[in-house]
Image: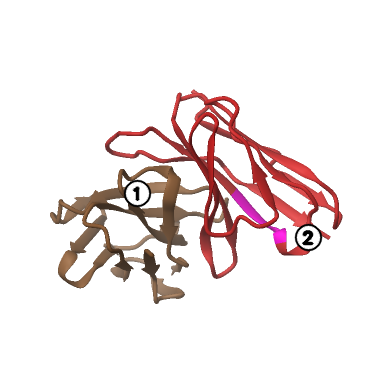
Chain colours: A brown, B red
Amino acid sequence: AQKVTQAQTEISVVEKEDVTLDCVYETRDTTYYLFWYKQPPSGELVFLIRRNSFDEQNEISGRYSWNFQKSTSSFNFTITASQVVDSAVYFCALSEGGGTASKLTFGTGTRLQVTL
Amino acid sequence: NAGVTQTPKFQVLKTGQSMTLQCAQDMNHEYMSWYRQDPGMGLRLIHYSVGAGITDQGEVPNGYNVSRSTTEDFPLRLLSAAPSQTSVYFCASSPRRSSGNTIYFGEGSWLTVV
C-alpha cells in the first residue's frame, strides 16, 4: 500500500524567512506521480506541481522550489522569502500509475503560518 | 469553463437522514473520485470511477454509495447519515492520459451531521 508522510504538523515563520516542507512517500510501484497542493483558508485545493517518478530534476517556479530524491523517497517543497499570503495548509500526494484522480494518497498536511 | 462543480457547498443533516452530494464535470474526463477531508487526516479516497458504469471502493467507502451513469456526473449518496460523516467532501476528475495539471478538484462540500 502506498503512504505519504508529512511529519511537520505546523510550521510558523516570520515573513521573508525560507521554509522547507517535508514529504516522504512509500510505494511499491516504479511508475508513480507526486503532487503538492495548497489549501488556503478559503478551503479550495490549489495545484502546485506534479512530478513523475522518472523525472528527478529539481524544479523552481518563482519563490517555490521542489527537491525530488528517489534514493530517500522524498519530495520536499521550499518557499523562499515567505510571504503572509503563503499561509495555508500544504498537502503532498502520491498517485500510482497514470497520475490520475482515481487513487491519490494524501499526507496529513503541514499548516504554514507566516507572520509579519 | 466550469471545471468540476459540486453542490451543495454547505449542508446540515440530522442523523439518519439521506442526501446526495452532486458532482459534475464538463471536461469529458474518464476518471472521477470522491475524497473526504477530516482534521489531521488529510484527504482520503471514498469511491472512484474509471468510466461510465464502472465504480470501485477507496479507503473509506462504508456508509456511501456511488453510481456513474454518465461521463459527466458522479453523485455521492449518504443513505443514513451519521455524525462520523461530518466532513468536507471533494470531488475530483482527470483524463485517462495527460500531462501537467491532470487532476481537477471541485471547491468542496461542507457537511455537518447532527
Residue A17 is at least partly visible in this image = no
Q: In the rendered view, does A8 fall on the left or right side of B57?
A: left
Tell me, yes or no, whether dots 1 and 2 are on the same chain.
no
Query: What is the chain letter for disc 1?
Result: A
Q: Nearer the viewer, mark 1 or mark 2?
A: 2
Residue kind at label 2, given as amino acid type: Ala
Q: Is residue B48 left or right of residue A58?
A: right
Secondary structure type for disc 1: strand
Cα separation, mark 1 vs mark 2, equals: 34 Å
Q: Which residue shows up at 73% across the image and 40% down it?
A: B20
Residue flagged by tag 1: what amino acid is it? Answer: Leu
Per the picture, the main secondary structure of the magenta-coloured stretch is strand
Residue B50 visible in the picture? yes
- Residue under the image location 85 percent in, 50 percent down: B17
Residue A95 among magenta residues: no
Disc on res. B82: 2
SS of the residue at dot 2? Answer: loop
Q: Quadrant of the N terminus of chain A?
A: bottom left
Frontmost residue, A10 versus A15: A10
The residue depicted at 46 percent of the width and 75 percent of the height is: A9
Residue sitting nearer the eye, B72 or A8 = B72
Looking at the picture, tell me which residue is in the foreground, A58 or A102.
Answer: A102
The magenta segment is B85-89
What residue appears at the point 57 percent right and 25 percent down from the top-left corner? B70
Compared to B25, does A55 lie above or below?
A: below
Q: Note whether B108 is above or below A64 in the view shown.
A: above
| Label 2 neighbour load within 10 Å: few <14, some 14-19, many 20+ | some
Numbered badge on residue A94: none
Q: Position of residue A106 (x, y in %)?
A: 44, 60
From the top left corner, tell me how far across and down residue B42 is, in percent: 51, 63
Mark number for residue A48?
1
